[in-house]
Image: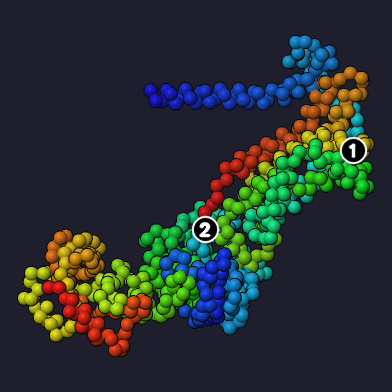
Amino acid sequence: MKRMEFNYGRWLGVILKIAMGLFFIFPFLWMLSTALQTLKETLSFPPVWIPASPQWDNFVRAMNGGPFAIYAKNSLIITGSIIVLQFLIMIPAAYAFAKYSFVGKPLFFGMTLLAFMIPTQVTFIPVYLLLADWGLIRTLWPQIIPFMTNAFGIFLLRQYFMQIPQELIESAKLDNATEFKLIWRIMIPMSRPALATIALFSFVSHWNDYFWPLVMTDSVSIRPLTLGIAALKETEGITNWHVIMAGNAVLVGPILVVYAFFSRQIVRAFVYSGIK
Amino acid sequence: MASIELVQVTKVFDKTAVIDRLDLTIEDGSFTVLVGPSGCGKTTLLRMIAGLDLQTSGSVRIGGKDVSNLAPGQRGVAMVFQNYALYPTMSVRENIEFGLKNNKVKRSERIELVESISETVGLKDYLDRKPSTLSGGQRQRVALARAMVKKPAVFLMDEPLSNLDAKLRGQMRIELIELHKKLGVTFVYVTHDQVEAMSMADRIVLMNGGVIQQEAAPEVIYRQPGNQFTAQFMGVPPMNVYELGANGIKFGFRPEAALLSQSQTQSQSPETNLNTNTPQWSVRGTVATREMLGSETIYQIKSGDRSYMVKSADDQYAFDQEVQLRVDASRIFLFAADGSRLLESEPDYAGYMDRLRGQRHG
């Protein structure tokens, strides 16, 4: 009897998981389907789910719809710089917050959390004016400088560092390790899952960012992929959903690859178990 | 080779002085054990020697050199922690090597050192394993190897055996004694366990409330305790101490100093007759508990509202049996009201002893 009940619950679980999976994967499938349709199919009602003949040509049209090499290069530079700079600033900051006591620590940490809670839409005009004042508007910097630190990352990493036993740090100090070496050889290797999580979140949000570059750029040469794909809409007067979706499929490609690569580390970041 | 001197050190935590103007000299090459109840300041003392906690005032000297303001890594000390503090992401080899790398020791020399140390502690086959795959005893050895490889002048150990099971702890105690003999460097060992202190130390520093109670060899601490705290802290079961009933004076005797005999036959037994010339204190009581430990038996003898612990080789006494308990006067300690020891040489000593004998029951 008991065994039967157990199986019943497990089946329910499996069904719910499949339902959830479909719910999340549906927009992706729709995007892929649309990317392979003709213009006429995209406009028909009820919607066409499976295109009569796959229009691979849509991808060619999307990539020829603008200077995509420049967009892709910009996206890579921007996201890459942001991640590198964030790590350079975040790791020492989180280490200090987690393992040292200094004057004003609660205040500084409070300010960091506050930064975490303020939406970018509140700050974009002052930031724009500041960067314009510095004469940086026609460069890639406005898309990098505001994201050099990551309040969420500092917070998550601090929590992680706090779980690392103090004795390990003391032991390293007795082993004559410098602070740099201590961070490099002990803190970083021990918090790889957290770092992977932060890198992925950061990558996704900046790779997909539309609002900020839209506000900060005024020419093609400094625009990222998201703006390039949005621009496809305007090429022929009516909305070319099939071409836009082909572009979007290209845009999300790298994210799926990166996610597949990091997913195990991310799960571990949230189920941390230390080695005693 | 280094002696350690603490000169007038004070440590203040949150405005309370945990240690107040303490002086201590630890001799070069000694195995010194700092022992005391938790919160007595022994770990703080060790951490000040290591440089992990800085003293609020006073100075720390190692090998005659003032290290008060040197970083832990510059003091020529190595430390073994209670939870071993092995670097979990590094292999055993990398753990042992880490300090050498930081001290810029050449690669060829490093390999040689790691090989020879790992042989000494029996870890040769485990060099490429991660600490998480090792047993508690093996981790302990890695921690020791990591400390030894730096050839420190001073070894500091903070309760290194308390995470091991009883059997392994006994074995590691012997290994540590051997290690100390072999290396010949200064060992400073912190523990709350007086058995560890007695068994390993050649010098014990007993602390309580941030103050050194007594500093001596284990035999001296045990046989000639300087005060009531020392007398009761060292030894299992602890010394029996009770009020004498005059001027707050207390008397005490070790559980093994008491002789038991059957109450009814006391006057006829030959051994009692043998002892009639030596002054004794005796009391009659009943056996309240009996713990048979194999080579010896521990009895709790209740007499009136007092209970005395007695350790005896004789296991014939049963629960609830009435017994006579006798202690030779030479094995009785007297303590003044403030806890200090009242020595035989003091004028009042004989008077108090007579008074004690007058309390003989039975």
- The chain letter for the residue carrying disc 2 is B
Residue at (6% x, 76% y) in the render: B268
In the displayed structure, A162 sits above or below B314; it is above
Q: Amino acid at mark 1?
A: Thr
Drawn side of residue B221 relative to residue A72, left or right: left
Q: Amino acid at mark 2?
A: Tyr
Q: Position of residue A219 (x, y in %)?
A: 93, 36
> Between B9 and B139, which is closer to the camera in this rendering?
B9
Dots 2 and 1 on the same chain = no
Mark 2 falls on what kind of element? helix
Q: Which residue is mark 1?
A: A217
Mark 1 falls on what kind of element? loop
Q: Which residue is mark 2?
A: B126
Using a 10 Å C-alpha cutoff, classify the residue at mark 2 as few (fewer than 14 neighbours), some (14 to 19) or many (20 or more): some
Q: Position of residue A186 (x, y in %)?
A: 63, 57
Q: Position of residue A180 (x, y in %)?
A: 70, 61
The answer to whether one can see residue B24 in this image is yes
